């Protein structure tokens, strides 16, 4: 499933996933009051990117591109740190992908990647809370809440990705043979 280099079609697909992620996040700007709801779109597009390209590093590239696009378009709050918001879960997914056996069924692989991304996302929030000056107990409670609810949204996204990939493949929108 991993070839040596990216093709032009792969690069375009990665850029499409990253740009669509940022565009949807900025257009919707949902203030649902639910912790972790942003993990749904993030995991969905990162997993679609990996499923469509099928190469290690595709998720990290998508996350870094999404962070750069969000930084240039001033989407969200955090300034240049917005890059970390998009890149850290993507890097965690790629590292987990290297550690996971490739014999796992696609759905279980996607669920494990989504949980790894949520763990990195919650850890980023935990460190941020400590840097702001919250006590360790408050930071731990917030991180646990973020991890739980973020995992729910991320796993929900991971469960619909195989169906979307099959639909994309059936319409000849993906060039790789495995989906």
Image: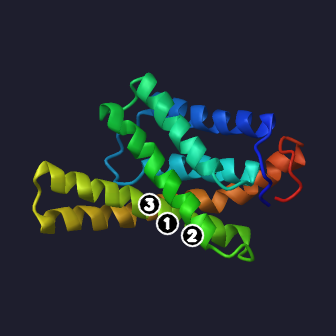
Q: Is residue 155 visible?
A: no
Q: How is the image coloured?
A: rainbow
SS state under label 1: helix
Mark positioned earlier in the residue sequence (3 or 2): 2
Q: CA distance from mark 3 to mark 1?
A: 5 Å
Q: Establish if 49 lies above or below 74.
A: below
Label 3 belongs to which residue?
118
Q: Are marks 2 and 1 in contact (CB under 8 Å)?
A: yes
Label 2 belongs to which residue?
112
Q: Residues within 10 Å of mark 2 (few under 14, many from 20)?
A: some
Q: Residue at x 14, y 66 (%)?
A: 136
Question: How far across and down, in percent of the image, does residue 161 sit?
Answer: 67, 56
Q: Establish if 73 lies above or below 21.
A: above
In the displayed structure image, the side of residue 44 where residue 141 appears, left or right: left
Q: Residue at x 11, y 56 (%)?
A: 134
Viewer-proximal residue, 2 or 53? Answer: 2
Q: Where, by quadrant of the figure, is residue 85 drawn?
A: top left
Which part of the image, by quadrant, shows the C terminus? bottom right
Question: How far across and down, in percent of the image, does residue 171 sit?
Answer: 88, 43
Q: Which mark is residue 57?
A: none
Question: How far across and down, in percent of the image, does residue 111 sit?
Answer: 59, 67
Q: Residues within 10 Å of mark 3 (few under 14, many from 20)?
A: many
Question: How far across and down, in percent of the image, does residue 88 sit?
Answer: 44, 51
Q: Are marks 3 and 1 in contact (CB under 8 Å)?
A: yes
Q: Is residue 124 visible?
A: yes
Q: Which mark is residue 115?
A: 1
Q: Residue at x 80, y 39 (%)?
A: 7
SS state under label 2: helix
In the displayed structure image, the side of residue 165 where residue 20 appears, left or right: left
In the displayed structure image, the side of residue 173 where residue 45 appears, left or right: left
């Amino acid at each position: 499933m991993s070839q040596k280099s990216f093709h032009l079609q792969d690069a375009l697909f990665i850029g499409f996933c990253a740009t669509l992620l940022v565009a949807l996040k900025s257009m919707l700007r949902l203030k649902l009051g639910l912790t972790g709801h942003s993990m749904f779109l993030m995991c969905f597009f990162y997993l679609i990117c990996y499923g469509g390209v099928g190469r290690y590093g595709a998720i990290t590239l998508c996350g870094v591109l999404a962070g750069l696009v969000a930084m240039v378009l001033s989407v969200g709050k955090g300034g240049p740190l917005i890059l970390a918001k998009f890149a850290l879960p993507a890097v965690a997914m790629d590292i987990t992908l290297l550690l996971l056996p490739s014999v796992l069924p696609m759905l279980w692989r996607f669920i494990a990647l989504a949980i790894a991304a949520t763990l990195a996302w919650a850890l980023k929030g935990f460190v941020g809370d400590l840097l702001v000056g919250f006590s360790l107990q408050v930071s731990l409670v917030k991180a646990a809440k973020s991890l739980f609810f973020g995992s729910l949204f991320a796993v929900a996204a991971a469960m619909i990705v195989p169906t979307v990939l099959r639909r994309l493949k059936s319409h000849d929108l993906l060039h790789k043979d495995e989906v």
